[in-house]
Amino acid sequence: MFFFVDAFGIRYYRGMSGKITILLSTGSIFHLPLADQFRAAKESGFDGVELMLGPELEHVPDAQFASLSETHNVSIRCVHAPFFAASGLTDDYVREIDRAIETARRVNAVLVNLHPFGLIRRPEEVRHLAERAGDIILSTENMPRGIDIFDPDEAPVIHDHEALNDFAGANGLKMTYDVSHFATWGRDIFSGYRLFQANVANIHVSDYIAGYQHLLPGRGELPLRGLLRLVGAEGVAAFVTLEASPDSFGRKGYEFVVEALTTAREFIEKELRRGT
């Protein structure tokens, strides 16, 4: 299979959209059985998945993730560390990132997405994690407005996008630009892209309106068409990942989920291509 190495040193495969690989975050459909998450990603045409770890997967062995990836012919390109540790946002969260790195290595993922909790006040932990990661890229994500469950000493950096971007760059981290999170601050999503552009490895795409995050594209008010065309034209991100909320699918069944995911993937792919 043809692959190439981009400016981030990430080896990835040519996907449907050309240079950028389109992923589905399994967190979008974690209400489905794990096997159906992989099956739905394949049937809706995504290039691969970003595996979202969390309490419900705490005891699932990495070998099972790898087996599902092989069975359904869906590569796990990224691994997302849990939103917080099972015991809360304590020092244990660093260990959750460490576990995500180990999972990524065992499933041949190339990037671990993480939240910055516990790292800003202890940058030595970033260095430890980077040593553990080796060739695996570590990418931290911008947080939404209203999150106040982390260490208050870290809040000024987490709430300040420019400061967070500077922290990432100074400590060897890449950025995951979560479009919906950025929109919660009432800021133009193009300005967020420009801010993180030089350091961005992954873009989490979803729509937003009036306090509702992680909607399927077209369900909110964000100018996603224009943003995706810009992303496609400039090609600086290795991955564009659909990260919607399971609430987007209501109580409808598997077939509806696949249909909605296919529509979202086609939208992302079409707009990325229009930018090239």
Image (cartoon, rainbow, N blue to C red):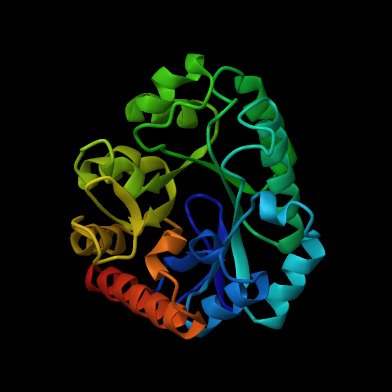
| Residue 86 spot, x, y in % from top left | 68, 39
Q: Nearer the viewer, residue 196 or 247?
A: 247
Q: Residue furthest front?
A: 251
Among the 4 quarters of the image, the one containing residue 77: bottom right
Residue 22, placed above or below residue 212: below
Q: Can residue 239 be seen from the camera position used here?
A: yes
Among the 4 quarters of the image, the one containing residue 74: bottom right
| Residue 111 spot, x, y in % from top left | 59, 52
Q: Give me the residue at 47% from left, 75% from top.
A: 15
Q: In the image, 203: left or right of 77?
A: left
| Residue 1 spot, x, y in % from top left | 61, 80
Q: Give me the residue at 78% from left, 68% from top.
A: 64
Q: Nearer the viewer, residue 232 or 240?
A: 240
- Total marks shown come to 0
Q: Nearer the viewer, residue 184 or 73?
A: 184
Residue 158, placed above or below residue 244: above
Q: Give me the residue at 70% from left, 47% from top.
A: 101
Among the 4 quarters of the image, the one containing residue 151: top right
| Residue 196 spot, x, y in % from top left | 35, 40
Q: In the rendered view of the protein, which quadrant contains the C terminus?
A: bottom left
Q: In the image, 140: left or right of 219?
A: right
Q: Nearer the viewer, residue 179 or 235?
A: 179
Q: Can residue 240 be seen from the camera position used here?
A: no
Q: Residue furthest top?
A: 153
